[in-house]
C-alpha cells in the first residue's frame, strides 16, 4: 500500500480501536519503506511492532 493511502485511512479511521487484521508492506513513491501498514485503520509501524501486537493479543485470549 502506498504511504498516502495509509495516511488517508488513518485520517478517516480516527482514534477507534483496531485489531489490525491485515497488514501489508508500505511503499512511498514505489519504494519499500520497510514498514507495514494496517489495511483497516492505516496504522504504519515496523513489522516487529505488529508482531508484538499479535503476540500480546494471543496471550490475552
Image: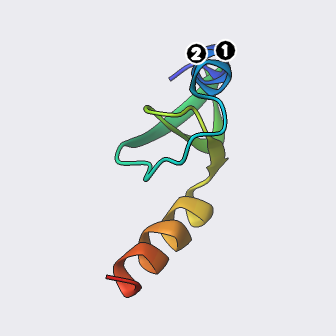
| For residue 9, above or below residue 60 | above
The C terminus is located in which quarter? bottom left
* Point 68% across, 13% down: residue: 29
Q: Secondary structure at mark 1?
A: helix
Q: Nearer the viewer, residue 46 or 40?
A: 40
Q: At which x and y percent is residue 32?
A: 61, 32
* Point 44% across, 48% down: residue: 20
Q: Which residue is mark 1?
A: 4
Q: Name the side, left or right, on which 27 lies relative to 39.
A: right
Q: At which x and y percent is residue 58?
A: 35, 78
- How many other residues sit within 10 Å of disc 1, few (<14), some (14-19) or many (≥20)? some
* Point 39% across, 86% down: residue: 59
Q: Residue furthest left?
A: 61
Q: Which residue is mark 2?
A: 5
| For residue 30, above or below residue 20 | above
Residue 7: image quadrant is: top right
Amino acid at each position: 500500500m502506498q504511504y498516502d493511502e495509509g495516511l488517508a485511512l488513518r485520517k478517516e479511521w480516527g482514534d477507534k480501536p483496531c485489531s489490525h487484521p491485515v497488514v501489508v508492506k508500505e511503499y512511498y513513491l514505489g519504494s519499500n519503506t520497510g514498514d507495514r501498514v494496517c489495511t483497516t485503520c492505516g496504522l504504519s509501524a515496523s513489522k516487529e511492532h505488529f508482531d508484538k501486537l499479535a503476540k500480546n493479543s494471543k496471550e490475552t485470549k
